[in-house]
Amino acid sequence: METLFSVLVGILFAGSIYLLLSRKLVRILLGIAILGNAVNLLIFTAGRLTRDVPPIIPLKSYLPVEATANPLPQALVLTAIVISFSFLAFFLVLGYRAYQELGTDDLLDMRVAEPKEHSEPPLGY
Amino acid sequence: MAATKTTVDITAAMVTEAVPLADWLLVAPVLLTMAGGAISIIFRKKSATQPWIAITTIALVILSNIGLLNHVLTNGVVTMVMGSWLPPFGIAFTADPLGALLALTASVATMCVAVFAMNSIAENERRYGFYPFLLMLLCGVTGSFLTGDIFNLYVWFEVLLISSFGMQILGNEKVQIDGAVKYAVLNLIATTLFLAATGLLYGLVGTLNMADIAGKLKAFDNSGPMLGLATLYFLAFAMKAAAFPVNFWLPASYHTPRLVVAAIFAGLLTKVGVYALLRVMLLLMPEGRDWLASLIGIVAIATMLTGSLGALAQTDIRRLMAYLVIAGIGAMMAGIAVGNEVAVSGAIFYSMHSVLIMTALYLLVAFMFQMSGTFSLREIGGLYIRTPLGAGIGLILLLAVAGLPPFSGFWAKLLLVAGALEAGRGWVAAGILVSGLFTTIAVGRLWIFAFWRGGNEHTVDGIQALPIAGSSDAADISWSIWLPLIVLTALIFVIGILPETMMSITENGAKTLIDPTAYIGSVFGGIR
């Protein structure tokens, strides 16, 4: 099961890196969305996939009776989901504002901060 | 209470005795900044009170950080666990000299920026949340310096990142949105890679507590997966710290936000990346560092050279400063590449120096812009006659960033070069010295053009050109601009004249990093 999931994580990473290398901002944002989910799945898989026994200790007992699912990766993934979701929301707005202000979603044309014409620094006093 | 009393022995999993009062200092900076941030959001419409809320909060944080540093230096590494759960179950906050020193320096730099911003951040930008963002940024940065849990470090990274995004786009100009796209996307990718590495590390050792990881990795006999992880961490943190060749987001974005914002970014954000590298490479994976040492060395030299040569090639003084940030990052990475006690002590010294000097330099740029009305090296000039005090401050700061004595940068570079020669890595030492030479030329030219020359380019010697329309007189410069500049310059000067105290702290920090016994002992009790 872990092998299968590892392959899936690999495919998601490959897809997101392909999208991140694109020139279009929208594709980069999609790549970020996939990257976040790929990492979530990675953490989940790294915590080992076991049968879905909830980590509940029965009454009058101090230890779980059988091997249970690992709750910690789920807590980690939950944190990471919240964070990546809020970042994606910010990025979508930022991308939209960039399109409005700069009139393009092509990164090669986004040269307001770094103008194309290069001026030489002063060479003399 | 009697009904819930069980016969289970909880001392195996929980701290039962009360936390000593002094240990609360460990969480105080985070709690204070978080509370201050929340209060200043409540008062978001009272833009006149907001600065004072922030300044009061940061003043308390500085006091608390001084107390913490003192506590750490007298009692050794201090640990506090959240929810009384014993490590490795609960999240631990662990302060060693490195973390405590950087937390203190960061709060001092933030204070200077908070005061400077009183006059230079417009009314409506305060309403868009400059001060809450500033406090949350400090919260994230201090949290990163003090946490002892690697996943928690990721969470603090995100706290400081989202605050920095908010500050980056303050002003809502075209150029800021353009800069923000590059800054935000690349920083988020770096942080996500860090998270991926952390997930894999958890899969490998089954713990997230840094002290626990350090102990477990040492006992690990198969080093292959660990070396892979070390490389992934190195990539993630190098991107965050702006090391060559993943540094192009920095000069593309640092000149776009408000200059006070750029000052706090340049002072704190890249240093968090360097701090994380120091922590992960030296404390968690020393074997990985040994394996990567040559690569880190090459990256460090390339970063220093591209940084200082890039500074030479700029016309815009804001972008010149951005390249100086990069050159400094290279020097700190050189300390990690060498990895012996002297060099690591130098890297810690340089991090502390870099927080102060980069904040001060961006504030100096803001001051120069107000005096001259331009950012261009071709048009700026004539500031010496108009503000001799400003010219003196400028000279000290620019010589300090180049690493010339008697200022704080000199001692950091001295330790780095001495460490590199001691470890037989002469080429790293050569890289530091050559980059220092280029930096000196770049900043020397800046000072001569901006202050010494009478006016813009081709002004003949002895002629004082009229100031550019819209620039202020020295008499109009508010105290809130002079005060932070003078305080930072004085700190850099005093540390440069009396480096012994600082050196003993950084040496102590380097010792704790290289030999993790004290760190692990503090987390798991026993050796306190």
Image (cartoon, coloured by chain):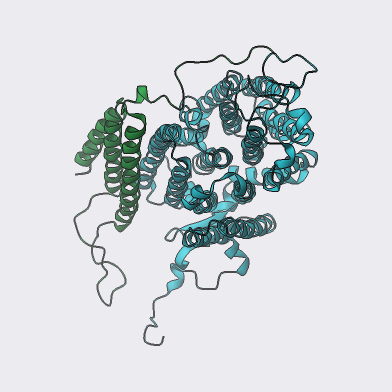
Is residue B153 positioned above or below B362 on the image? Answer: below
Can residue B203 be seen here? The reply is yes
Can residue B147 be seen here? The reply is no
Q: Give the chain letter for cyan.
A: B
Residue B144: % across, % down: 51, 49
Residue A24: % across, % down: 29, 27
Is residue A69 positioned above or below B441 on the image? Answer: below
Give the image quarter of residue B481.
top right
B134 or B91, which is in the foreground?
A: B134
B82 lies left or right of B322? left
Residue B249: % across, % down: 46, 30
B310 lies left or right of B187? right
Residue under the image location 70 percent in, 30 percent down: B398
Residue A23: % across, % down: 31, 25
B19 lies left or right of B361? left
Looking at the figure, which quarter contains the C terminus of chain B?
A: bottom right
Residue under the image location 64 percent in, 47 percent down: B112
Looking at the figure, which quarter contains the N terminus of chain B?
A: bottom left
Give the image quarter of residue B363.
top right
**What tint does the image give chain A?**
green
Disc count in the image? 0
Give the image quarter of residue B229.
top left
Residue under the image location 69 percent in, 31 percent down: B413
B49 or B295, which is in the foreground?
A: B49
Residue under the image location 36 percent in, 22 percent down: A108
